[in-house]
């Protein structure tokens, strides 16, 4: 892994549910890079992300993410890896019994941050995603796009070096989807690496970035036209 | 981890999943209440059987022996380890007792002065029937002893009943404890399962398993305190107020180890341990098995 990479895979083989997901794959993502991961349903896109946030382990090879060697990382250390990466899912995963502020603050509380810092940082990230005015709203009172913004704010709270997004626009209408993509692009412009799984080619075409395709266990850079 | 956060989350957990928390508390309450009642009843039954056993006397009738032999016998019998207490009944005293027990009809017979002197021996309530039987054999062989009598059948019956009582009580107690543990653990597991989204979100943002677990442990302890407090209160009310009204003789029976607070404290402690342990077991397993990904 070069010092310029936030993700590096070297000869990595992964099987999940008895299916070959990656077969001797090499891949790297540099600091501040934006990359889409595309592929057919069941090709292993989500499993690839699971490997990066260590929900699954590789069978072979070396996986390094944000300076952690994921292939040998003991279970106890996994939470520390996850504090260095922001994770965004399609289904939001917000806590419905807490308001927007508490949903974001939660990410900092679990890492033992001080109250004053939490307040300052939550307001900062809510400002970044344009939701300062909705900090007291409950998740169910927000639109899908707004909920996804809260999730992104929560993912950014710990100032990660890498954002992993699994179909972040999958549950959104085209307008909300564009607005989320603009936000992700803006975050990337601030220097954070983004690895986004999607099957929406329109998004890939509209917001062009490096694109890799997972197909039959291999991961290759492709050009989307 | 901030203590404030743990306390806030622990207590908030009770409010957020009220039905699950109520079910956990109720199952803990029933479990420790049953164990508490069984302990008290079992202890009192054992106490009664020991009292009855202690009342079984060994009567040692003496031959017509002089005072020195009587004193020697008294000393030798008194030195036997299972002898708790002994009284000497002289020939005169025996006549007096006879007169008292048989009234007018006994007067004429008492004049014959045929009643022998004896020792009334009370054995320790810890002594087994076999030990008492062997004591009887030993005393029987002493020079100057005419006959030794004791109610072997009654003592054997008491010992058998006590053994059965202890065995049945222990079996019921263990069964209740086993069922209660299974019930409480599974209820707590359901409580934790109801919070799987919270656990998943915590894992997603990098909370350690210990951090996720602690509010659940606190919640388990709080549930234990509530359930134990209620059960202890009810047991106290039951045995100190309600039952003595209907069965006055129960009032005479004591709490285990002489004071009410040992059993009451034990009930609360047991509920807290079960709540804590149940939460720990369920939370550990569930947190370890929960993955971040849901789709």
Image (cartoon, rainbow, N blue to C red):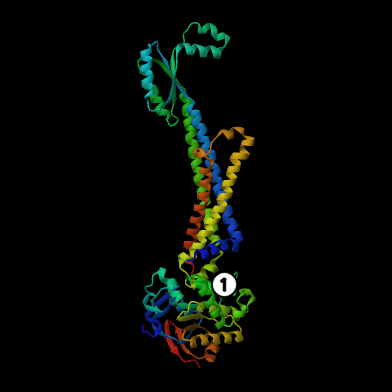
Q: Chain of mark 1?
A: A
Q: Which residue matches tag 1?
A: A102
Task: Point out residue B172 in the picture as x, y percentages from the top left corner.
Answer: 52, 43
Task: Point out residue B154 in the picture as x, y percentages from the top left corner.
Answer: 49, 26
The answer to whether residue A221 is visible is yes
Whether residue B293 is situated above or below residue B159 in the rendered picture: below
Q: Residue furthest front?
A: A116
Which one is in front, B180 or B91?
B91
Q: Secondary structure at mark 1?
A: helix
Tell me: A37 left or right of B235: left
Residue at image location 58% in from the left, 83% down from the top: A130
* Label tally: 1
Residue at image location 46% in from the left, 28% down from the top: B156
Whether residue B227 is situated above or below residue A18 in the rendered picture: above
Residue at image location 45% in from the left, 68% down from the top: B208
Task: Point out residue A72 in the picture as x, y percentages from the top left corner.
Answer: 37, 73
Which one is in front, B80 or B153?
B80
Task: Point out residue B209 in the picture as x, y percentages from the top left corner.
Answer: 46, 66
Whether residue B237 is situated above or below residue B115 in the rendered picture: below
Mark 1 crowdedness (10 Å alpha carbons): few <14, some 14-19, many ≥20: some
Whether residue A90 is situated above or below residue B54 in the rendered picture: below
Tell me: B149 left or right of A89: left
Residue at image location 53% in from the left, 77% down from the top: A120
């Amino acid at each position: 892994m070069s010092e310029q990479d936030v993700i590096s895979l070297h000869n990595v083989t992964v099987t999940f549910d008895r299916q070959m997901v990656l077969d001797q794959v090499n891949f790297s993502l540099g600091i501040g890079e934006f990359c889409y991961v595309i592929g057919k349903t069941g090709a292993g896109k989500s499993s690839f992300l699971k490997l990066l946030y260590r929900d699954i382990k590789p069978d072979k090879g070396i996986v390094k993410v944000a300076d952690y060697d994921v292939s040998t990382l003991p279970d106890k250390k996994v939470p520390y890896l996850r504090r260095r990466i922001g994770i965004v899912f399609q289904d939001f995963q917000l806590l419905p019994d807490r308001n927007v502020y508490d949903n974001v603050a939660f990410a900092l509380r679990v890492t033992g941050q001080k109250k004053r810092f939490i307040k300052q940082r939550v307001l900062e990230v809510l400002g970044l995603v344009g939701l300062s005015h909705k900090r007291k709203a409950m998740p169910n009172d927000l639109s899908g796009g707004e909920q996804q913004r809260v999730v992104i704010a929560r993912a950014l709270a710990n100032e990660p070096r890498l954002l992993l997004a699994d179909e972040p626009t999958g549950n959104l209408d085209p307008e909300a989807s564009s607005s989320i993509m603009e936000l992700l692009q803006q975050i990337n412009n601030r220097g954070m690496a983004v690895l986004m799984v999607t099957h929406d080619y329109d998004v890939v075409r509209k917001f062009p970035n490096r694109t890799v395709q997972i197909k039959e266990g291999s991961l290759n850079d492709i050009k989307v036209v | 981890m901030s203590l404030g956060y743990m306390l806030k989350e622990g207590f908030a957990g009770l409010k957020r999943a009220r039905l699950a928390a109520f079910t956990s508390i109720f199952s803990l309450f029933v479990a420790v209440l049953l164990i508490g009642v069984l302990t008290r009843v079992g202890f009192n039954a054992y106490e009664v059987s020991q009292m009855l056993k202690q009342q079984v006397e060994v009567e040692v009738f003496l031959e017509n022996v002089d005072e020195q032999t009587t004193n020697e016998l008294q000393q030798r019998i008194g030195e036997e380890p299972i002898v708790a207490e002994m009284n000497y009944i002289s020939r005169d005293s025996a006549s007096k007792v006879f007169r008292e027990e048989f009234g007018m009809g006994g007067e004429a017979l008492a004049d014959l002065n045929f009643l022998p002197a004896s020792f009334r021996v009370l054995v320790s309530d810890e002594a087994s029937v076999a030990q008492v039987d062997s004591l009887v054999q030993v005393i029987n062989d002493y020079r100057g002893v005419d006959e030794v009598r004791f109610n072997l059948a009654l003592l054997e019956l008491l010992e058998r009943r006590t053994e059965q009582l202890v065995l049945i009580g222990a079996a019921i107690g263990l069964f209740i404890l086993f069922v209660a543990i299974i019930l409480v653990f599974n209820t707590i597991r359901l409580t934790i399962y109801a919070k799987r989204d919270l656990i998943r979100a915590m894992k997603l943002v990098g909370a350690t398993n210990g951090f996720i677990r602690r509010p659940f442990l606190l919640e388990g302890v709080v549930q234990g305190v509530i359930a134990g407090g209620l059960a202890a209160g009810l047991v106290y009310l039951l045995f100190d107020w309600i039952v003595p009204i209907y069965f006055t003789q129960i009032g005479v029976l004591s709490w285990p180890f002489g004071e009410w607070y040992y059993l009451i404290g034990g009930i609360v402690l047991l509920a807290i341990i079960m709540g804590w342990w149940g939460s720990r077991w369920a939370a550990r397993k569930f947190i370890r098995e929960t993955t971040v990904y849901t789709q």
